[in-house]
Image (cartoon, grey):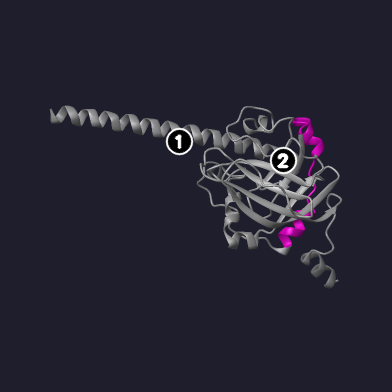
Amino acid sequence: MNKFFSSVLMGIALVLIAIAGYYFADNAYNYIQAATSNNELRQLSGQKDPDSITQAIGLGTSTDEGGQTAQSIAAAQKRVVDFTALKKINPQIIAWIYIPNSRIDYPIAQAKDNVFYLHHDFYGRSSFSGCIFLDKDAKPDFSSHDSPVYGHHMRNKSMFGSLDYFRQASFRDSHQITFIYLPGKTIKYQFVQGQVLSGKTLPPNNFDFNALTLVTCEYDQPGDHYMVREKPLTTLPPGEADPNDPAVTASANTK
């Protein structure tokens, strides 16, 4: 009898191990597929620094560990995104978001609803990680009083999975700047507010500026949603340096 129960328990254990292995392999495949698609778009847009395979499955060292510097912010300001190439892939790609020294470096799409890009990638293909997208009611030039941008809360810290880091004061202090690149301009934003959202209702923007609001959407990382709200600092033509950036000022003073 004991041997019988031991055999049953062993069989159950093997089934559970097989299920766990399948779940891990399936998730790893989905993560790698999403990372490959995102890396393709980064190359098309003229960007570098692709996600590695180990990052895609959540094993790589996060690029969110180092803080922003005057040099990294100045370099980000001079970025130029090739929207002509991106719009050939998907005409609904309307912007690009980049937080220097972080993994948040993606195109932004906008659809007629807030559902499609929860389950489709930037190519319009079915995807469990979706893609980063602007609220359907926001103006595509980010001139609305509030411009909510959504991304899935991914366990491997892709999409907006790393937005959680803003809960830490040390990360907020060292990642103050976000860039939104548009076909005709680059907007630089600064962190103002971080807030845990217990429900699905986004609080209104009560500030006296047109805010950029970054919001996590739950997917494979259950828990509260998190919101980051930022204020615009400068709006400049694509690729133009900000004369007030410390790195630019320092360079000018050495000439």
Is 142 above or below relative to 64? above
Left or right? Give the position of 106 relative to 217. Answer: right
State the residue in front, 188 or 61: 188
In this view, the residue in front, 14 or 155, is 155
On residue 24, which mark appears?
1
Q: Residue at x 64, y 35 (%)?
A: 37
Q: Which residue reaches farthest left? A: 1
Depth check, front residue: 165 or 227: 227
Would you identify the image quadrant in which residue 133 lies?
A: top right
Q: Amino acid at mark 2?
A: Pro
Q: Earlier in the sequence, mark 1 or mark 2?
A: 1
Residue 13 image-quadrant placement: top left
Q: Return the residue at label 2.
A: 107
Can you give x and y, in whole percent of width and height, for residue 239 in the image? 83, 51
The range drawn in magenta is 71-92
- Location of residue 182 in the rendering, given as x and y in whole percent from the top left corner: 81, 44
Above or below, 246 against 26 in this view is below
For the N terminus, the quadrant is top left
